[in-house]
Amino acid sequence: MDIITTIKGLKNLGMEILVASMQYTIQRGKLEKKFAPPKDDSVTPVGQLESWERIESGATFNFTSAKLEVVFIKPGLPRLTWTPGTLPGNTVVNKNSFKPVEVAIDEGAFGVGLESDGLKLTVGKDGSVTVADLDGNVIRQDEPPIMTGRGWTSRAAMNDDESFFGMGMKASPFSVRGCEFSLWNMEPRGAYKAGDDPLYISSPAYLSVSPRGSYLAFFDNSFKSTFSFKERLESRFEGGALRYYLFTGTPEENVTKFYGLVGHAAMPPRWALGYHQCRWSYENEAQVREIAEGFAKHDLPLSVIHMDIHYMDGYRVFTVDRKRFPDLKKLSQDMLAQGIRLVTILDPGVKIDPDYFLFKQGRDQDLFMKLPDGELVRGVVWPCWCAFPDFSDPAARDWWAQQYKVLIDKGISGFWHDMNEPAAFAAWGGSTLPSVAVHKLEGRGGTHLEAHNLYALQEAMAGFEGQRRFKPERRPWILSRSGWAGLARYAWHWTGDSESNWWSLQQTIRIVLNLSVSGVPYSGADIGGFGGNPDKELYLRWFEATAMLPFFRVHSAVFTPRREPWCYDEETLDITRIHLRRRYSLLSYWYTLAAAATRTGSTLVRPLYMEDVKLVGVDDQFMVGHSLLAAPVLEKGCVTRKVTFPAGNWYDWETGSMFEGDTTAEVLAPLDTMPMFARGGSVVPVDEGNQIELRVFIPANDGPGVGGELYRDAGDGYGASLLETFALVRQDNVVTITRQATGDFRPEATDMLLKIVGSHKSVSVDGRALEGDNRLIPFDFSTITINLD
Ligand code: MIG
């Protein structure tokens, strides 16, 4: 956030902070000069291959001035490491030993070939690397890398037919081809606009998609870097070894394998998939209660209320303002009785105040970030001058984790990590801390250049650990503004301070999809945009679209008009109710997707190119799981929209009318309607009160359909679960669904409802005909048979 917005948000404190942030910016400039490392513009080629030797699962190669290690960490999955340079710590990839993989190696005229599971990687005598399949189709072609300064530059060829996706949160076109990014997590000045870079959360991972195939490249190097997708692929790191992994397969397989390496998403509590209401801020107990009452009165479901910075005592993290919230514990108990959880914001800046316990502890136990001369790094945030925990230090993480107890004891159910790029108010030169700071980096030591991008990830590690420690019977939940690959293991993400305009809504879809394929499966934007005043149409369209994104929250800045669903008019209130109900009717479906993400590494929302690589250009539609296709209206004044249908057949979710696959159609989308379709051949669980309705969509063609799954458990904790799979096959005019189940959880209702969408003649369940209007079937049926004629 820039100074002007800061002051708008802070009427009284504005002057003090303004002056301090000016001082900070000047001081930072001096520190950057004083501690600047000697300039190093050297450019050193790796030279020629001099020798190589076989090692377990791969080989090492000695070049004139560098060394390359190639190890297959799994069959067909190579890891390349060029040194010299510091190897990454184990924050992002926490596995360093892998089962041995058989690799066939042969030496030819051009270099050395390593073959594993249908993949051939050839290391050229000049240091180039070619990855191809066994038919010789080249998947990726790396030029010899170059040692640039204290780091590395990697270069690879880009083919005309390739599109690229991922890289974290970018204000870029959907395919990042043609773009150049800086990977240096940063709060932008004010709300982000098209082209702004860098932003809050980066990830050094991109997916190549072309009609010839797909691969995902992931660089395990957190140093400040630039990634370019202009004439060729170029990644330039300011330090560290050049270590990267190449995943090959379909786009979906590549993303799943990537999560297999950086960690599957933590299983969230079920409530986190419901609706969240937020505002900067609900400033006191009365306001929080008023929000809960408003939702009850207007018959709107609500799962979470977020508490922004006003709940703290003078913005001191891990304190509560007793005047505003005299009995937070009672408040959270009363909320919970209504099914509402409270989430509180936490900022990493610790006010420099000799009387503040947290500052004293951090200073006395040496847990804050330092400058090379041992002085504290000081920056200005909401509490004015602050010190910042060094989350790269395990002792600091342990100490920070301990602090969550206070709020957990008061009944807080989850935590919202803001300002963790880390952000510091600066008048110019980027809202962050001096890059010359030093870190403990797991005891090995290192500079901010390496630790900066990991700051939020390591904060999330602490927050997750704190929740495991103090509420072991419940699942942690964290919402983090910044992060890096690996964040999924601990946290969700919201896209920071968006503008209240149509571009921002459109960009939300691109961002959520690109985050999904590069390490952050759970995200969403502030509905209506953070800092503006969306009109009714923009608000509703944003609300409708977000009802089908993983994270569903309205938030708004302190200087904007209130934005709860009842703040517009009756019609707006009614339409938000429709979409809230739709979300809650699909909670079991979402929860099942969440369980799949945790179990298998899949993503919850899926770009259309995962269905068909020809659809790389579709950035205004997305799949939710494998069964639902969402086509939100993202343009002002539109009451119809064009929908692109992947292969198969599709049913309008509300009306049941059918659309052929591999076509496009213009569909009606009045203000209260977000077009959504179910794929023929799927089985979708729908919540009807306390009962499940199994909705079966008749496929147009013979063969297996996508079927469906239903995951159930207590909704939180680590107790028994039940995973049911519904395999669907159509043969001629008979559709058969077979249920299989694993796990010990017993649902309360012993029966469920069956609904069949698409024309059919008769249905029988376990051999017994379902007569008339009877739709009740036993939940533990074995086979459903549907006769189509
Ligand atoms: O400097 O806590 O992106 O969601 O409401 C602004 C106040 C700090 C930025 C977050 C926003 C939050 C706001 N914060």
Image (cartoon, rainbow, N blue to C red):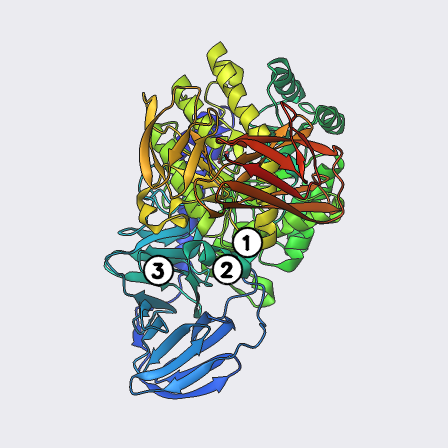
Work out how far the residue at label 1 is from the one at label 3, CA to CA, in angstroms.
21 Å
Give the mark toward the camera: 2 or 3.
3
Work out how far the residue at label 1 is from the one at label 2, CA to CA, in angstroms.
7 Å
Which of the 4 image quarters holds residue 51? bottom left
Is residue 480 something that shows in the picture?
no
Q: Marks 3 and 1: in contact by CB < 8 Å?
A: no
Q: Amino acid at mark 2?
A: Lys
Between 314 and 225, the one nearer to me in the picture: 225
Sequence order check: which comes first, mark 1 or mark 3?
3
- Residue 771, percent across and down? 64, 27
Q: Within 10 angstroms of label 3, few (less than 14), some, or many (20 or more) residues?
A: some
Q: Marks 2 and 1: in contact by CB < 8 Å?
A: yes
Which of the 4 image quarters holds residue 777? top right
Q: Amino acid at mark 3?
A: Gly
Between 105 and 98, the one nearer to me in the picture: 105
Sequence order check: which comes first, mark 1 or mark 2?
2
Mark 3 sits on what residue? 213
Q: Compared to 613, does 571 lie above or below?
A: above
Per the image, label 1 sits on a secondary structure element best described as loop
Q: Which residue reaches farthest front?
A: 789
Q: Marks 3 and 2: in contact by CB < 8 Å?
A: no
Which of the 4 image quarters holds residue 430? top left
Mark 1 sits on what residue? 601
Q: Amino acid at mark 1?
A: Gly
Work out how far the residue at label 2 is from the one at label 3, CA to CA, in angstroms.
16 Å
Mark 2 sits on what residue? 257
Q: Within 10 angstroms of label 2, few (less than 14), some, or many (20 or more) residues?
A: many
Give the mark toward the camera: 1 or 3.
3
Sequence order check: which comes first, mark 2 or mark 3?
3
Is residue 137 something that shows in the picture?
yes
